[in-house]
Image (cartoon, rainbow, N blue to C red):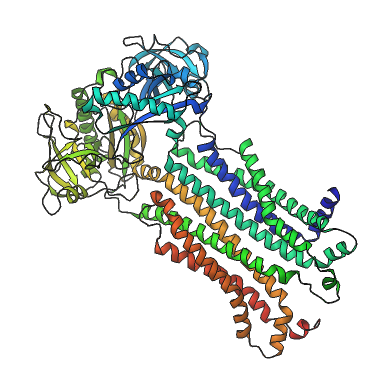
């Protein structure tokens, strides 16, 4: 083996050009695969940082008519009943992630991400603690003194890592709480929590159908998820019998907690991306296989001499395969460097998306093991056939003086198949890349329906007990709106509970229309609670009727301004003014329906989900909603520079309440950029795959055609000597290579038309068979292929017939 290695290194030193091209090609193929696997590993494979994480299950609900990503939790009543009646789990716990305002002596109020959890939850998760303790059942009782566990990061940043903070008082939403512990540095459940506190008296008064609580449990030894689901089905049957009105149409689901955090759609997308980079590796392997076949043809005499001196076929195969192994090994080393660069760039870009704390993107031991497997696979795919084919040498034919041997002729068919495969796979990747890039371009150029220029945004939350209640909340936000309008730096300012970058929809009932039959999805719309100045501030034009006004108070009849899509969908061909709808389903027996009357129609606005669906929208008066503890401020700068409004907004809020932080403070342009960041990142990844595949395919086709032309130098010389014109020579070469190009393009486009369906949920404004993308792919590969054929063809035209015929 060592002798084979020495011979290989000596041979590669004599052919540095060949070695460099092969190593770089394999480095690209292995590098993008290692980087993509590290991303998939961080999101899907690594899992959650809990002991026996496969035993931690999550429970959720939806309706039979819900979309796959539409989920709700359980109500408090359902949680307590489930906990009392179940036998499959050691226990169940409830939690909810909440924003909160944290303040302490000597520090400004700070908005933090918090997790409210029942006392048994941390034990079920096996949550680590750095200092102190987690809350107990006594801490979780209604009326118990408030306690809090600080996250490790906020302990370090706000409290300078002072261990003496244990036992001290801080304020959480203006309520004094005792710090009882510091969470471990690697624990921020469920995603990016800064503080943890017990449920205490939260949620216990919720109605049975208020399903806002997230529930999880830990399975007993020997119990499967399917068994837990079967048990819950039995419990749910009791729910339906005892509470028929609250459980009608509700479906209860049990799954692993990991499956809850990474849904099926994400898994499919990541699978497509991992498959795409495997195609890049296959293209790289095909290129290297072609290089090795060409090199084997050049070394025919050398190999024949070795065989004549007694080297058996196995010895020759081992020598040639060692060469491939060295190339693949060096390619893997450089590929890991490229992968590390790619992972770092990905990590830097995904930070703005705030992934969960347990998603770690790095080249860990699993990724290195995967890379080792890729290296072996690349070695086999690229090297095994060339080694076997080159070892079948006809000694007599090869050793005759002046003979070019027969190996190149025997390998020609296989090399053409490799080229066809390369072109087909490159075509597929370019189509998928083009669809994603076109989707992002369409998304960024789509009409928003409002004017984001000069707009600044900030969000305020009234989370303390004193501010609970619609009267106090309305009073505060009404004063805030008045003061913002009076600020000289502000041209206009409006309030809304969720701005245009927040999508989603809720069920509604249209007056005069019967409810949807069981099993069918009823009407739904995106409904926002807004102040009268919200639409004018964003310059959303009113098309008919009137806008919301200050007269639309809590005591006045409920009204709404709807979008054109709302009007066209529910009252086509007639005026929607004066029509009525309900939020939610039909009123229950004995309930008085709270009808909302349409008073105006505004232009449709693009929502932040960017999935191409036109969602009906309605704006109701913020004074007429029951709970408005969180509101967003959108202010238009009089100077045109929205950043100048940051201190104005903070100052105005502090004049009213000095303990309220303004969070999510950013310009409208920044908010829009964040809304589309995930799709841009996916498009960028596909773009990298497409560019690498395109380059490898072009280089591969050029290499094959250059070698084919060089092998036909004597034939071309004969043809020229016999009177063949340059046109005849060009047609000869283009006929040989053009057929491979056409077949590869046909196969690639055919597969791409079906593969594009896998990305359908990620596309905006384009279809999976977008004709522009298909045409652009066809033309770009045809151009690259034509150029790869033209350069060797032009070189062939410069062949001197005398030189070409010298050996004939």
* Residue 144 quadrant: top left
Residue 693 lies, in percent from the top left, at 56, 58
Residue 239 lies, in percent from the top left, at 28, 24
Q: Nearer the viewer, residue 321 or 358?
A: 321
Q: Nearer the viewer, residue 476 or 777?
A: 777
* Residue 178 quadrant: top left
Q: Nearer the viewer, residue 136 or 472?
A: 136
Residue 266 lies, in percent from the top left, at 44, 42
Q: Residue at x 44, y 53 (%)?
A: 436
Let me know if residue 496 appears in the view: yes
Is residue 488 found left or right of 329 in the rendered image?
A: left
* Position of the C terminus by quadrant: bottom right
Residue 300 lies, in percent from the top left, at 80, 67
Decide: is 662 above or below 90.
below
Residue sticking out furthest to the bottom: 723
Let me know if residue 111 appears in the view: no
Q: Nearer the viewer, residue 167 or 480?
A: 167
Total labels: the figure holds: 0
Decide: is 555 above or below 42.
above
Is residue 806 found left or right of 525 in the rendered image?
A: right
């Amino acid at each position: 083996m060592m002798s084979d290695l020495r011979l290989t290194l000596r041979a590669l030193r004599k052919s540095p050009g060949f070695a460099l091209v092969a190593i770089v090609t394999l480095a690209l193929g292995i590098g993008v695969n290692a980087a993509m696997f590290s991303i998939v590993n961080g999101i899907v494979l690594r899992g959650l940082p809990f002991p026996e994480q496969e035993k931690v299950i999550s429970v959720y609900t939806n309706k039979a008519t819900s979309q796959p990503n539409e989920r709700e939790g359980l109500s408090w009543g359902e949680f307590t009943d489930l906990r009392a009646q179940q036998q499959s789990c050691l226990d169940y716990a409830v939690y909810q992630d909440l924003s909160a305002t944290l303040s302490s002596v000597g520090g400004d109020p700070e908005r933090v991400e918090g997790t409210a959890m029942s006392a048994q939850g941390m034990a079920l998760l096996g949550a680590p603690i750095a200092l102190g303790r987690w809350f107990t059942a006594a801490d979780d009782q209604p009326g118990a003194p408030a306690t809090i566990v600080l996250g490790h990061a906020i302990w370090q940043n706000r409290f300078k890592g002072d261990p003496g903070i244990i036992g001290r008082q801080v304020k959480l939403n203006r309520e004094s709480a005792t710090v009882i512990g510091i969470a471990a540095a690697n624990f921020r459940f469920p995603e990016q929590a800064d503080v943890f506190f017990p449920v205490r008296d939260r949620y216990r008064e919720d109605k049975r159908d208020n399903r806002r609580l997230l529930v999880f449990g830990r399975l007993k030894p020997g119990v499967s998820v399917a068994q837990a689901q079967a048990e819950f089905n039995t419990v749910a049957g009791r729910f339906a019998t005892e509470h028929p009105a609250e459980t009608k149409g509700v479906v209860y689901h049990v799954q692993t907690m990991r499956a809850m955090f990474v849904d099926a759609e994400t898994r499919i997308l990541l699978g497509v991306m991992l498959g795409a980079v495997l195609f890049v590796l296959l293209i790289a392997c095909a290129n290297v296989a072609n290089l090795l076949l060409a090199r084997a043809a050049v070394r025919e005499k050398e190999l024949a001499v070795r065989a004549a001196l007694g080297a058996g076929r196995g010895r020759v195969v081992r020598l040639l395969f060692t060469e491939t192994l060295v190339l693949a090994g060096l390619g893997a080393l450089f590929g890991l460097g490229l992968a590390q660069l790619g992972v770092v760039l990905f990590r830097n870009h995904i930070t703005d998306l705030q992934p969960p704390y347990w998603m770690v993107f790095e080249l860990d031991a699993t990724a290195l093991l995967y890379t080792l497997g890729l290296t072996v696979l690349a070695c086999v795919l690229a090297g095994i056939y060339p080694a076997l084919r080159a070892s079948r040498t006809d000694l007599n034919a090869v050793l005759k003086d002046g003979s070019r041997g027969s190996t190149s002729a025997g390998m020609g068919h296989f090399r053409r198949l490799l080229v066809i495969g390369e072109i087909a796979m490159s075509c597929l990747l370019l189509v998928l890349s083009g669809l994603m890039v076109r989707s992002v371009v369409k998304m960024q150029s789509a009409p928003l329906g409002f004017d984001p220029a000069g707009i600044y945004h900030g969000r305020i939350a009234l989370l303390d007990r004193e501010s609970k209640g619609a009267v106090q909340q309305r009073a505060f936000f009404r004063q805030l709106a008045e003061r913002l309008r009076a600020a000289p730096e502000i041209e206009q300012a409006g309030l809304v509970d969720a701005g245009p970058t927040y999508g989603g929809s809720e069920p509604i009932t249209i007056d005069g229309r019967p409810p949807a039959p069981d099993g069918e999805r009823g009407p739904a719309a995106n409904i926002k609670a807004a102040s009268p100045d919200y639409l004018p501030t964003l310059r959303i034009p009113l098309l008919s009727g009137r806008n919301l006004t200050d007269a639309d108070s809590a005591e006045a009849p409920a009204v709404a301004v709807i979008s054109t899509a709302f009007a066209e969908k529910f009252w086509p061909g007639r005026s929607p003014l004066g029509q009525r709808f309900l939020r939610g389903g039909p009123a229950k027996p004995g309930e008085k329906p709270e009808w909302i009357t349409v008073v105006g129609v505004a232009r449709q606005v693009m929502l932040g989900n960017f999935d191409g669906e036109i969602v009906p929208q309605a704006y109701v008066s913020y004074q007429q909603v029951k709970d408005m503890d969180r509101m967003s401020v959108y202010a238009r700068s009089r100077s045109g520079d929205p950043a100048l409004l940051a201190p104005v907004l903070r100052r105005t809020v502090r004049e009213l309440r000095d303990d309220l932080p303004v969070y999510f403070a950013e310009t409208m342009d920044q908010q829009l950029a964040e809304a589309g960041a995930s799709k841009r990142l996916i498009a960028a990844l596909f773009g990298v795959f497409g560019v690498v595949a395109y380059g490898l395919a072009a280089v591969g086709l050029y290499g094959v055609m250059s070698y084919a032309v060089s092998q036909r130098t004597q034939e071309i010389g004969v043809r020229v000597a016999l009177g063949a014109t340059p046109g005849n020579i060009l047609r000869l070469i283009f006929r040989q290579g053009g057929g491979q190009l056409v077949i590869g393009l046909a196969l690639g486009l055919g597969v791409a038309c079906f593969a594009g369906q896998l990305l359908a949920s990620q596309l905006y404004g384009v279809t999976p068979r977008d004709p522009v993308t298909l045409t652009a792919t066809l033309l770009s590969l045809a151009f690259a292929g034509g150029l790869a054929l033209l350069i060797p063809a032009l070189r062939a035209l410069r062949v001197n017939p005398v030189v070409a015929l010298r050996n004939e």
